[in-house]
Image (cartoon, helix red, strand yellow):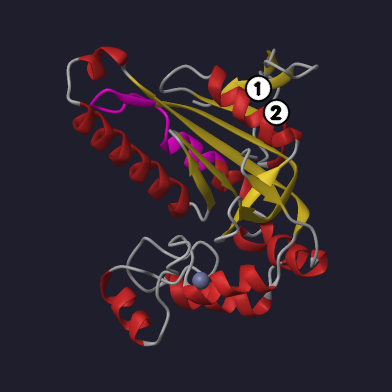
Amino acid sequence: MTGDLEREDGNGPLWHQIFCEGHPALLKQHRLHRILPSPPRCRLCLVPFAGIGGWVMRRRGKAPSSRNPHFCNACDGFLDSFPGGAEVTMPVLFVDVRQSTDWAAHHAPAEVSARINGFLDHAARAITDQDGFLMAFYGDCIVAVWPPGFCGPQNASKALMAARALRGPIPGGVAAGVAVNHGPVYISTVRAAKGLFRDVSIFGVEVNKTARLAALAAPGQALASATVLVAAGEDADTATPHDLRGLPDPVLARALV
Ligand SMILES: [Zn+2]
């Protein structure tokens, strides 16, 4: 979904099992790692990198990968050995950070950047608290998905809980436009332009829809598409058509309350 990262194909059945059905070995690691403190964690196996749990696991050889610190060295090696992906129907969430230009005009750039990074940490925590799978940060934007193979059948409800946690005014001149949607997404490994490391990213029209919807949301507002509301068993009758830039058809959505 970014210009310099290319989607990779291959190992479809493996990635389908990981993200759609749940891979027994990975789910076993999730159960074990989830109870160990503290975040940040490897995005794939959830091994903790901080706190006492991080210390214990480092002594067992599980440390952040030097090539991509969002993954542990074992999972980084796994992404490298099994490049590819699968189409998964799941919730997608975008958090589009807006800083108040008025606030930014009266503070030093370092202060503005610290405040935004603080907000990004807060948002990442709200997402991982609801078992969301974080993608890379793209500038001032956070993207996450809820693969059923990670989060179980309640994944749409969990995505809505995360979206609701990110609503509202945040003190200090930073707020976000949030959007959450649900649909088929191609999730795959990507290789950075220089081939130095791999990451995981998402592709497809539902991703673009979510990005556009987040751009449309007012600061402090979270918009949910009718598809995610239906998937979560929530009322979608009051969703109204939203025209999104670059998309031929309007998308039905409503603000979360
Ligand atoms: Zn890992």
Secondary structure of the residue carrying numbered label 1: strand
Q: Is residue 223 left or right of residue 240?
A: left
Q: Amino acid at mark 2?
A: Ala
**Magenta region: which residues?**
160-175
Question: Is label 1 in contact with label 2 (beta carbons under 8 Å)?
Answer: yes
Q: Does 223 appear in magenta?
A: no
Label drawn at residue 226: 2
The quarter of the displayed image where residue 75 is located: bottom right
Q: Residue furthest front?
A: 194
Give the mark nearer the N terminus: 1 vs 2.
Answer: 2
Q: Report the residue at 69% width, 26% height from top.
A: 236
Q: Name the residue carrying label 1.
A: 253
Q: Report the residue at 26% width, 76% height from top.
A: 52
Counting from the top left corner in percent of width and height, residue 20 is at 73, 60
The quarter of the displayed image where residue 118 is located: top left
- Are there few (<14), some (14-19), or many (20+) residues within 10 Å of tag 2? many
Q: Amino acid at mark 1?
A: Ala
